[in-house]
Every structure is written in C-alpha cells, then in structure tokens.
Image: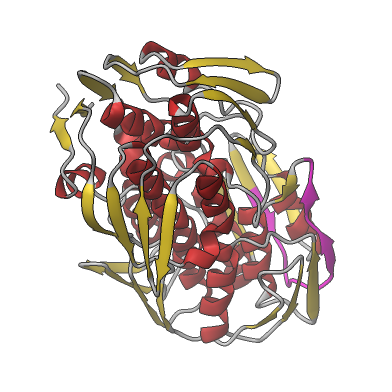
Amino acid sequence: MDSLLIKGGVPLHGEVTISGAKNAVLPILAATLLTPEECVIRNVPDLSDVKFMGKILESLGAEVALDGDTMTVKSGRLKGVGDYELIRKMRGSICILGPLLARLHKAKVSLPGGCVIGARPVDLHLKGLKALGAKIKIESGYVTATAPKLIGGDIFLGGRVGPTVLGTANIMMAATLAEGITIIESAACEPEVVDLAEFLNAMGARIHGAGGPTITITGVKELHGAQHAVIPDRIEAATFAIVAAVTKGEVTLNNVRAEHLQAVLDKLRDAGVKWERRGTSLLVKGARRLKPVDVTTLPYPGFPTDVQAQMMVLMALAPGISIITERIFEARFMHVPELGRLGAEISVEGPSAIVKGGAPLSGAPVMASDLRASAALVIAGLVAKGTTQVHRIYHLDRGYEKIDEKLRALGARVERVPGE
C-alpha cells in the first residue's frame, strides 16, 4: 500500500482548485440507472470511489465512458443484481438500490462496507422503500427488494442521530417513478441532496423542497437523459482551509461555494483565522496564534462530522483547552491515538475529545483508519517538525483527488511512496 512522506514546517501559499463533491457524485451516478437514455455528468472527481461506482454500473449492464472530468452513462438494458465484491467495498453503493427497484421493480444489492467509523445501518433506507410498497429480504449478505409497482406515501426518515443523507437520496430516487405523491419528512438538508434533486429534475422528475426537512416528489412515468455539473466538494474545501490555517499560510481556494461552509468558516474565524469570500473563490490566511474553540458535529447546516478530525489538528495547535463533541458517529475518534504519536495531547471522554493545545508536533510514522482521519494525519504532518509517514493512504484516494499533487503545488514537501 502507498504511503505519504511529509516533511513539515512549510507555510503553504498559492491557489488550489476544489474538485467535484464525492458525496454528491455517487448518488448522481446511481440516478443514471433510472433512464435508458444517455446522461452526461461533468466535474466528476478522479477518486477510487468514483471508479468503483463506474464498475458497479458496468456490472449492472450500463455503458460507462470517462473523458477527463466528464462521465457519460447509458443504462440501456440492466440486470437487477449488482456485483457482490464491488458493492460490499463501498458504503455509497447502497444508493443503487432505489433506482434499480424503481426501474426494474426488483433489485438485489450486497450490504455495503466502507470506512470503519462505527455502525452506519441501512435500516432507514429499507424503511422508506417499504413505505413505497417494496418487500424487503436480507439474506446471505444481500438486500433483495421487490415491488410490482411503487406507490407514493408519507415517509419519516429521522434517525437516532438525525436524518440520513444516503437514505434521503435513495428514497427520493425511488419515488421519482412511483405512482402518486411521496412526502419525505425529516429529510437530510445537505447540499449533496439538493444537487441530486436538481439532476433528477433535469431528467424530468418533479421534486420540490430539497434542502429543507420536507421533500415532495410527484411520480412520473419515465425519466429521460440529462446533463449535470457536480457541485464543488465542501469537505475538500474545508480541509484545504484548515491546511492554510495551521501552516500559517495564505491559500486561495477556487471553485468553492462558501454558503456550504458557513459552520466551518464560523469556527475558523473564532479560532483567529482570517478568510475572505471572492465570488466562487475563498482566500484563507493562517493566524499567527490560534485560539481554542469548541465544536459539536451536527447534521447540515451544523458543523460536518467529515471535518471533525481535521479540526482536531487545529485544536491541538491552539494554546488552551478545546472540546470537540461527535454527535453523528460513535466511533470516529480512531485518529486520536495516531495524533498522539505526533505529540498531540487529546483525551476522549464519551462522545467528546478534550484537546490540550499548544504543544509542538513532531513527525512519526502513523496509520490512517478512515478517509477523514487520513486527511487529519496529513495536516498534522504538514506542521510537525521532522518527517511524518502516513500509511494506508488508499483511504485518501477514496475522497481527495490527487491531494499530494495539490499540496505540492502549494509548496508542501510531500512525496507518495509506492507500497510493496
């Protein structure tokens, strides 16, 4: 497995272009299964998860072509059973269940995997599909769903820790071809849900209210092909904003929607970081002395759980006590011991991590446990004295397009070391 070798201590300067959103593009690609006509998706990020999804679509019978950042999908004749080995490796693959069921009236999809950051059940996905009239069976690692026809209904998708983003996407896609009207209550409000709704509406769907807690879908008989450009990745943008902040650099982030980052930008300002919005760009200037802050992760528009690990690095560098409370995933502090290897002083008490900041970090070999933890370790390595080697960076390649190249363009001393 490849690793990243990082020599820290260099303030980063320059410009970086934020790629298309990983969490938006995967359900959008799944939505192409709803029509036999050609769909063209632009601003597609070069990620291993996207390549996996392309292979999954092909395994279902779709024709997939990638040209730069444009992916063309034509799902003419499909089969309702996805490749077990492909699907189980990626959590986002569960979003093919709704489109397949709506289009073919049957679907058989393996239970998905992904990063190890606690239980992320699909019960709300299945609850929603059942409410549309599907019969669900779980057997031998597969979810099998059947429905002679889907019929719209009222669906509540609130879960123990709030709405489900992929569950909202799955039910919204299935409901586009259901008879009658579907109303999703406690729907996820994330920008990625809005992006999917805009693509579906371009295909001929009738969806209203996306971005709010109530989404109304009026079913149509069929959908047609469409073109769509994926929104910028707000998590990648937040990650590079924190990179600029902690390295005491000055970085311009291009292709950014600052309105999607308000919770993060608010906390960065509290920490003493200066930023300036310039149209679709964001200029971020690091503070000479960071201030401690307290953060609680919440569903959008709250502080995103996917930025928790990166923010913890900033807290470790800010003199004083900071507290970060994780309200979305119960096991998302696996990066804490690895940050400790670099010199961070962090203790975990239940859902909260107490960070005693201000101690200098020093390089060491560390092991990434998941996608965002990998990003946090890279950020820590950029400010640590000496050399840090981040192992198992295949997690990074799932969600950050060419992150080592982008960092080098900003002046970072980062080298990808091929694995054996």
Whether residue 60 is visible, yes or no, is no
Is residue 40 shown left or right of residue 223?
left
Residue in the foreground of this view, choosing between 103 and 202: 202
Question: At 55% from the left edge and 30% from the top edge, which residue is drawn?
Answer: 117
Query: Residue 178 location, x and y as percent?
Result: 72, 76
Extreme-right residue of the structure: 154
User: Which quarter of the rendering shows the N terminus?
Assistant: top left
145 inside magenta stretch: yes
Is residue 305 shown left or right of residue 63?
right
Whether residue 251 is visible, yes or no, is yes
Question: At 58% from the left edge and 69% from the top edge, which residue is drawn?
Answer: 104
Question: At 52% from the left edge and 85% from the top edge, which residue is drawn?
Answer: 202
Residue in the foreground of this view, choosing between 405 and 44: 405
The image shows residue 68, relative to residue 201, as above or below, that is: above
Per the rendered image, the range of residues in magenta is 144-160
Is residue 406 shown left or right of residue 48?
left
User: Which quarter of the rendering shows the C terminus?
Assistant: top left
Query: Residue 136 location, x and y as percent?
Result: 73, 50
Query: Residue 190 location, x and y as percent?
Result: 61, 61
